[in-house]
Image (tube, rainbow, N blue to C red):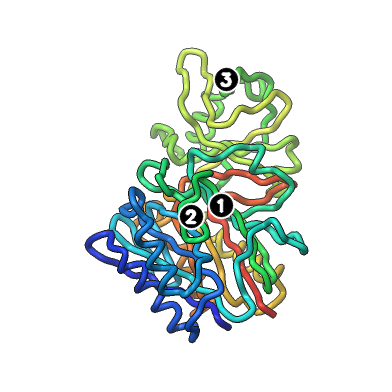
Amino acid sequence: MKVATSIVLGNQPSADLASKAVSNAMRKADITIANSVLLLLTSEFAGNPQAAIKTAAKAANCTQVMGCSATGIFTEEDWVLDAPAAAAMVFGGDISIELPKNNPHHQPLLTITAPNAINSTWLNNGNQRYGGVSGDAIGQGPFSVWQNAKGEVAGHIEAYFSGVKIATGTSHGVQLLTQPQQIQQTNNFDLTLLNQHAPLGSLQKAWKSHTKGHEQVPLHLIIAIYADNAEAIAQGNFNQTTIISFDEENGSITLAHALTAGQFLCWALRDTTVAEADFTVMAHHVAEELANPVDFALMFSCLGRGPYFYNGIDRDLKVITQTFPRMPLLGFYGNGEIAHINGSNQLLPYSAVLSLFSTA
């Protein structure tokens, strides 16, 4: 199989890091010319990544170089946060990255976008998607994302892999604190009446029951799980959003996504033990769905889920390397994850999206 990765760290955001990452990966894949390259750079490159992109293209002897800058990047070998680094995955043989204008088998699209380039019309234009939001420090560019070995001014890129079979799964890694409750009233992003009670009181009661104490609710760890009916939540077919703020006087809660009366909602907790177990189950399920030997993988993880969440160890990455030893893996920690769930492409918080590929 002509796929391999490499990650290279440095003291400065030098273009040589990208060249070395590509050259190392080419050597491991035993190729001298790559069909395509996925190149990820840390946010130290965000202001001017073009030199690194060009040296990567030169090292690969190809112009199909695509990728993004992100706060953190990783391969199966290592992860990097808060230091200049470059990671590359090279493709040779019968595998290549193709632009979506010619997608005869309607393969799901690898999708990478800068935070300022997301829009719902493009996100749900009829194509199934998987990917993430590049999380560089400013999210504005000038080239947060690139393809064809140059920055993409549209702020988002999309492509599919030819010559492979793909299966994708998502891990939310949350523990439900309540049963599904029906929403009776909302005001734009404000949740004002839940199960005939003030939403803040509902959350505080659930948290007190969970902790058996009087600690304050850790809003940064609370997720609102919602769906059109309670059965969908029970089956795991739900959407999720985060809490922005609350009003102690009227008991309302402001969410990052506007919900509507009639929908059902659960309060959930982001928990490391639950998250690791959920990711493990998801990874095995995706491998079963693929039903072929896994040759390489891409993973898109939330910056709030990786080593910062797992106390300095990326347990999700550890699950992958233990389950699929020596499998080439590339990914980044971003500002959101993209996956096709319940018939639509969704932008997810605090999740991990894993795509497994087979050339068989």
Instruction: Please state which of the two labelled residues, at mark 2 or mark 3, is closer to the viewer.
Output: 2
Give the residue type at disc 2. Trp
Q: Secondary structure at mark 2?
A: strand
Give the residue type at disc 1. Ile
Q: Residue furthest left?
A: 11
Q: Secondary structure at mark 3?
A: loop
Q: Is residue 95 above or below residue 317?
A: below
Res 350 visible: no
Say which label, 1 or 3, has the lower sequence index.
1
Q: Nearer the viewer, residue 296 or 141?
A: 141
Judging by the rendered image, the residue that carries numbered circle 2 is: 146
Say which label, 2 or 1, has the lower sequence index.
2
Q: Which mark is residue 355?
A: none
Instruction: Please state which of the two labelled residues, at mark 1 or mark 3, is closer to the viewer.
Output: 1
Residues tagged 2 and 1 counted as in contact (Cβ below 8 A): yes
Residues tagged 2 and 3 counted as in contact (Cβ below 8 A): no
Q: CA distance from mark 2 to mark 1?
A: 7 Å
Q: Residue furthest bottom?
A: 30
Judging by the rendered image, the residue that carries numbered circle 3 is: 198
Judging by the rendered image, the residue that carries numbered circle 1 is: 157
Give the residue type at disc 3. Ala
Q: Secondary structure at mark 1?
A: strand
At 53% across and 77% down in the image, what residue appears? 3
Left or right of 302? Residue 179 is right
Q: Dividing the image into 4 quarters, which one contains the C terminus?
A: bottom right
Q: Nearer the viewer, residue 95 or 217?
A: 95
